[in-house]
Amino acid sequence: MAFRLGVIADDFTGATDIASFLAAAGWRVTQVNGVPTQALSTPADAVVVSLKTRSCPAQEAVSLSLQSARWLREQGCEQLYFKYCSTFDSTAQGNIGPVTDALLAETGQTMAVLCPALPVNGRTVVHGYLFVFDQLLSESSLRHHPVTPMTDANLLRLMDAQSAGQTGLLPLASIRQGQAAIRQRLEVLQQQGCRYVVADTLDENDLAALAAALPASVLLTGGSGLGGAIAAHATGQHAAAQTRETPPRAGRGVVLSGSCSQMTNRQVAWYQQHAPARALDIARCRQNAEDYAREMAQWVSAQPDFPAPLLYATDAPEVVQRLRQRYPGEDIGAMIEACFARIATLLCEQGFSKFIVAGGETSSLIAQKLGVTAFTLGDTIAPGVPWVRDLHRPLWLALKSGNFGTTDFFSKAQELYHD
Ligand SMILES: Nc1ncnc2c1ncn2[C@@H]1O[C@H](COP(=O)(O)OP(=O)(O)O)[C@@H](O)[C@H]1O
Ligand SMILES: O=C(O)[C@@H](O)C(=O)COP(=O)(O)O
């Protein structure tokens, strides 16, 4: 069963993000979680594999990405797309570089394009520097990310540091001259020995120009912007008129926030004014994770009058930093993720059917521990954040990337419920 694009996403929020953009262009999208073991059974234009490989050891990320690539190609995928964060979230060791290198070796392609830009959410690339709205990545709140702090905005330097080859630039001037100039520039860079090409991108027109010009011989990597543009180029539509499923009002829900991004801090502060909210006590969680998770799940359960109480670990960068210093050498982030995942599992066992989750790592672990193996796409709450439903049961999730959505996001998600 041939299909156009096989996407390997390095976290679950990123996967639902790109799936929503591909679907918005009118493509049929199948989204599976983890390396699939069974053959594809439904016709699709794109298949998205969600992994949790952004911050795990590079070898593990490479292995899971290669297994996914092989499965996608066996199923008839024409072109691979490695989806990572629009803010290039990675460490000096990876995992964007090592996974890109492995995929190049696997496909026999000799060049990869790097296009994290997502203009609709303020991510642009100019002269190879990544901006978050009007701030350089390294001056934005992403410099304080608890797991992958981004302290350099130069994508060429970042890629050179974590990969085996050399990176060149496809400048805005070439992109704006159109297909011939783009291809010519790629050839020149190839002759100069570049394996990776950072694409400058300011707006949707630049993404469209790239989508039209990039040859099949180039490995596609980046954010959801280029993915959406490729689908739109194929269908001729940007926003296909489609009605998508939304969660029912009936059934209990919860908001679990494990992101410490600037936007999530605002969203948590806003939502605390509208619903019962409780902060995770990290010290107690550290002492006895199982008992503490049970206590928190009980607290959520004991708020039956509210459609979605909030539990959060979300905090300001200086608090996160202090916590790190207090427990040196401990992976506090992973411990908090595990606590949220346990709470989600306990609530699911009690019949909770709607989970609104903030944070990519947090969302990935929760979806894995809830045993969700495939999603079906629902309505979009904010650009890049759709509701998704477990393909096999009436369990709904809204998996929000740290920095996506407006201040009232958690309420906006619930405004889409249907009677
Ligand atoms: N108060 C806190 N102190 C330290 N780490 C935290 C705290 N709250 C959350 N974290 C961790 O920070 C990380 C946030 O990453 P993630 O869930 O991907 O959010 P984002 O989408 O903002 O990147 C997770 O590993 C989470 O467990
Ligand atoms: O591309 C993006 O920005 C998102 O899809 C994404 O991957 C964000 O990651 P998190 O902020 O860690 O959720």
Image (cartoon, grey):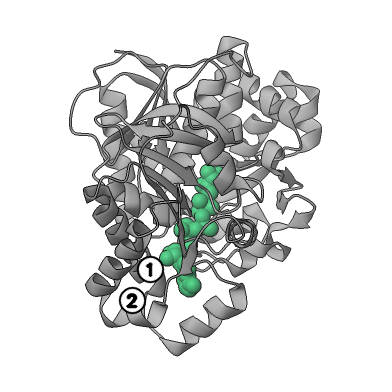
Quadrant position of residue 365: bottom left
- The crowding category of the residue bearing disc 2, from other C-alpha atoms within 10 Å (few below 14, some 14 to 19, many at least 20), is some
- Please name the residue shown 51% across and 28% down the image: 379
- Please name the residue shown 71% across and 52% down the image: 132
194 vs 266: above or below:
above
Q: Nearer the viewer, residue 90 or 172?
A: 90
94 vs 193: above or below:
below
Disc marking residue 336: 1
The quarter of the rendered structure image containing the C terminus is top left
Q: Nearer the viewer, residue 218 or 34?
A: 34
Q: Which of the two labelled residues, at mark 1 and mark 2, occupies the earlier sequence position?
A: 2
Q: Is residue 157 visible?
A: yes
- The crowding category of the residue bearing disc 1, from other C-alpha atoms within 10 Å (few below 14, some 14 to 19, many at least 20), is many
Q: Nearer the viewer, residue 349 or 124?
A: 349
Residue 31 image position (x, y, % from top left): 36, 30
Residue at far front of view: 305
Disc marking residue 413: none
303 vs 419: above or below:
below
Judged left or right of residue 329, residue 201 is right
Q: Is mark 1 within 8 Å of ligand 1?
A: yes
Amino acid identity at mark 1: Ile
Judged left or right of residue 6, residue 68 is left
Give the labeled residue for mark 2.
285
